[in-house]
Image (cartoon, rainbow, N blue to C red):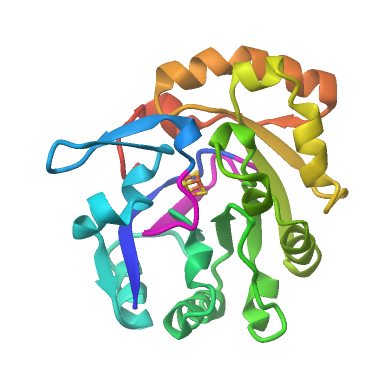
Amino acid sequence: MLYLVEHFYSIQGEGKYIGTPSLFFRFGGCNMRCEGFACEEVASDGTKVIGCDTVYAVNKEYFSHNWISINNSGELLNIINHYELPPNVDIVLTGGEPLIYANEPLFIDFIESLHKKGHKITFETNGSLAVDFEKYQIYKKCIFALSVKLSNSDEPLNKRVRGDIIYSIATNAAEAFFKFSIDTESINLGLQEEIDEIIIHAPKTKVYCMPLGGSKEEVESNTEPLIEFCKAKGYNFSDRLHIRIWDQNKGV
Ligand code: SF4
C-alpha cells in the first residue's frame, strides 16, 4: 500500500526539464521534515504545521486523512486515462519523498508499466534513500533529480547527505542532476563548502540552484542573490516557475 496525495498535469516548474509538459504524481510521506524551510500550512484542526513547501505531503499526522490509499498499480495507471495527454508525456514522481516506496511491488509495477508505455520517468528525491538498481533494473531507465538537502533544512548532516547513495544513483541511473533550494542568508553565510561536500560524491553531475521559498514573494526575494551566486560559481540557475506563476496554489 502507498499514499498518493495528488496528481496533476502541468509544466515542470524547476530543474533541468523546466517548462516540459509533465504529469505529476505526488506521493505522501517523507523520511525528513525540513522544518528549517519554515513554510506554514494550516491543518483541518487549525494547527499551524511547519515544514517545507509540500508539508501537506510530508506530515502524516496532520494531513494523511486527505491522502489516497493505493493498493495496486492499476489504480495509478487508471489516473493517466483521466487526462487528455499528448503521447508519451513525461511523468514526474514527487512527494514528499517518493523513494520511501522504492521497494513496494506495486510501485515497481507502476514504473515498469509507465516505461513500457514509452513515458520518460523522473524522480524528484532528496537522495538519501537507497535504490536497489540490481534487483530493480527499471530504475536504471529513470531520471533522478537529486534535491539533496542543505543545512538550511535543519536536518542533520548524516541524514541529509548520504555519499554512498548519491554515488549509486548518479552512476546507475539513466540520468541524474543536483537541484538545491537556496536562500540569500545561506549564500551570505558561505554555502560553497556545503555544496562541495555533496557534489564531491558525483562530481560530473550538473548542478541547478533554485531560489528557496514556498511563496512567490519569497522566491522573488531570493532570486537575484542566487543568480549572482550561480554566475560566480558556474552553476545553472533554475527558476521555480510553478511558484512564480501560481504562488501558493497546489495542484498546478
Ligand atoms: S526532503 Fe523534501 S519533501 Fe521531505 S521534508 Fe524535506 S523538502 Fe519536504
State how many labels appear: 0
Q: Is residue 196 above or below residue 74?
A: above
User: In the figure, residue 35 lies in which quadrant?
Assistant: top left
**Going by the picture, which residue comes out furthest to the left?**
45
The residue at 39%/25% (across/down) is 215
Q: Please report the bounds of the magenta region as a residue range.
A: 15-33
Drawn side of residue 152 relative to residue 113, left or right: right
Q: Is residue 203 above or below residue 238?
A: below
Regarding residue 223, the answer to whether it shows in the image is: yes
Q: Is residue 79 magenta?
A: no
Regarding residue 88, the answer to whether it shows in the image is: no
Q: Is residue 26 magenta?
A: yes
Image quadrant containing the N terminus = bottom left
Drawn side of residue 140 relative to residue 26, left or right: right
User: Where's residue 136, x and y in %?
Assistant: 63, 83
The residue at 41%/37% (across/down) is 53
Q: Is residue 225 above or below residue 41?
A: above
The residue at 64%/56% (across/down) is 127
User: In the figure, residue 207 lies in which quadrant?
Assistant: top right
User: In the figure, residue 14 lies in which quadrant?
Assistant: top right
Which of these two is toward me, 250 or 84? 250
The residue at 65%/22% (across/down) is 186
Which of these two is toward me, 38 or 252? 38
User: Where's residue 15, x and y in %?
Assistant: 62, 41
User: Where's residue 122, x and y in %?
Assistant: 58, 59
Which of these two is toward me, 18 or 63? 63
Image quadrant containing the C terminus = top left
User: Where's residue 228, x and y in %?
Assistant: 73, 14
Magenta stretch, main secondary structure class: loop
Which of these two is toward me, 235 or 125? 125
Drawn side of residue 89 relative to residue 45, left or right: right
